[in-house]
Each structure stands twice: as structure tokens, then as C-alpha cells.
Image (cartoon, helix red, strand yellow):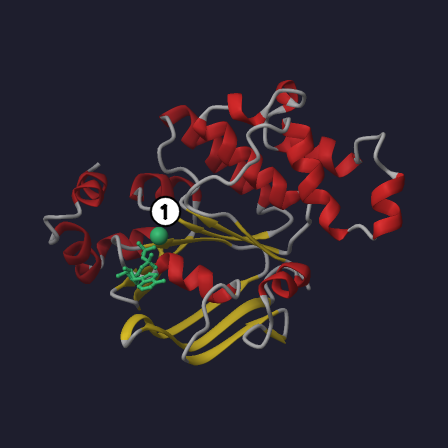
Amino acid sequence: MSKGQLLLEIRNLEVSFDGFKANSEVDLDVLEGELRFLIGPNGAGKTTLIDAITGLVKPSKGTITFANKDLLQRREFEIVRLGVGRTFQKANVFEELTVIENLDLAASFRLTLPKLFRRRKTVMPEVLEALDVVGLPDYGDRPAGVLSHGQKQWLEIGMLLVQDPMLLLLDEPVAGMSKAERTKTGELLQFIAQTKTLMVIEHDMDFVRRFSKKVTVLCEGQILCEGPIEQVQANPMVQEVYLGRAHDRRSQEEVKA
Ligand SMILES: Nc1ncnc2c1ncn2[C@@H]1O[C@H](COP(=O)(O)OP(=O)(O)O)[C@@H](O)[C@H]1O
Ligand SMILES: [Mg+2]
């Protein structure tokens, strides 16, 4: 695959939970090399969309094609092997293991058994590289449990990088981070986008404006609009969704910011 080619193609996707449509009529194209943001109010169906791509939930309608391969008939681990990596809203690191051990464990998933036993004494080069890329070189031998919330998110991104996926799907990676950590994360995402494709769920419009060119807005399970962030923010329907909902105060403040 090369930059600008269609990497992920979703057509007429519907995910239904006991008749409730968490996603419906979703058409989405992501090109190789994009850093795409997926925004929308709570309950819009953003996580469900990532769950559908990664095989965690089974859609009731539609198609998902990744690198020209149909994903719907595949199981979670097969989708990972094809090159789709994801993070969850809550960080999933092994707190008792060191940062390097966490990365090492994530990296070992692609090794064959003989290699797995042979390599134990040395740290794999991709592990050291990931440690550096995510900005944790001084923490390699520390237990992951001592990391701050933001650092754990970076470690998780590192755990994806060592698996060398083509597409990274990140579910609210900057939620709960300090301003400085957010900026660092935005820069990290842009760095990763030089060689990989990313789709990132995020609420903070200010953050999205700083780091992305293209945004997809999801609302009540459907795509409301898509395009450059300036265009999306100027869209009256998006303003209604973000400003018109009294219960979604976080988004309101962020649109005003
Ligand atoms: N496993 C599930 N079973 C039933 N309903 C679900 C399940 N997962 C998500 N939902 C519902 O689908 C809707 C979309 O959820 P979600 O994709 O998590 O939204 P978002 O990530 O945009 O906040 C919500 O109303 C949620 O309650
Ligand atoms: Mg979510």
C-alpha cells in the first residue's frame, strides 16, 4: 500500500444491540497515511465503530474492507494480524511488569515459538525504538504501575507500534491528560502518521483543530458530516449537536474555546 490509497472502506454499516442501532448507514473511507479524527457526542457510536472494525462486535449489515480484505468474516486476532491495532478508552497495561516488559510482550505476538524462546536475553530493537518514539526512554526498567495516566497511554501506543500495524485506531487517547501531555500526544500522533494511518476518537475540538486535517462527525450512530475541521465546525448541524445539548457540557465548552 502507498500513501493516498484507500486503506479502510466501510459501506452501509449497521451495528444493532437488541434492535437499538448504535451505528447505521455508516460509509467511511480512510486513506493510507491519514490522521483522521472521529468526533461526536457521548453515545454517538464512535467506540462501537472501532469495535466493529476490530471484530469485537458483529455488524448486522454492511461491509468493512481493509487493505482489500473483507474484515467481517474474520476473528479479532486475525484482524490484528492483518495490521489493525487499537487501544481502548481505559489503558490496558500490565502494571507489575516494567515498561520494557510490556512492550516486549506486545512485540512477541508475531514471533514463532522457537524465536520466542531464543530471544529472551536481549531487548528487541523495535522495543527500544518504540520506547524512544513514545517518549519513555527513562522509564524502561520501571514498573508500568508508576507511570502517570498520560504515560500509560503512550506506553499503550508503543505496545501497538511494536506490532507494526498499518492502521491504528485510538479510542480517546488524550482524555484525562494535562495540556502539556495533550500537546505531546498530538505531536506523537503526527509523527506516527508519517509512516502509518490513524483514526483517533477525540472530543476536544481545539485539539482536533491543532493536529488534524480531516474530521468525521458521528451523531446518533450515523455520519453527520465529514471534511476539514474548519468546515465541520462551521456546519450548523454540528453546532447544533455540540451546542444544543445541555447534557454534553464538556463539548459545549470546547466548541466555545
Ligand atoms: N455492548 C453493548 N450493548 C448494548 N448497547 C451498547 C453496547 N455498546 C454500546 N452500546 C450503546 O450504543 C451507543 C453507542 O455507544 P458507544 O459506541 O460507546 O458511543 P461513543 O463511543 O460514541 O460514546 C450507546 O447508546 C451505548 O449505550
Ligand atoms: Mg466511546
- Label 1 sits on residue: 202
Residue 94 is situated, as x and y percent measured from the top left of the image, at: 57, 35
**Three-letter amino acid code at the position of disc 1:** Glu
Q: Quadrant of residue 236?
A: bottom left
| Residue appearing at x 67%, y 63% in the figure | 82
Q: Is residue 116 left or right of residue 215?
A: right
Residue 59 is situated, as x and y percent measured from the top left of the image, at: 43, 75
Residue 192 is situated, as x and y percent measured from the top left of the image, at: 59, 43
Residue 196 is situated, as x and y percent measured from the top left of the image, at: 62, 51
**Ligand 1: quadrant of the figure:** bottom left
Disc 1 is placed on an element classified as: loop
| Residue appearing at x 57%, y 27% in the figure | 144
| Residue appearing at x 30%, y 65% in the figure | 225
Q: Is residue 50 left or right of residue 129?
A: left
Kindly tell me whether mark 1's CB lies below 8 Å from ligand 2: no
Q: How many C-alpha atoms fall within 10 Å of the one at disc 1: few (<14), some, or many (≥20)?
A: many
Q: Is residue 146 left or right of residue 126?
A: left
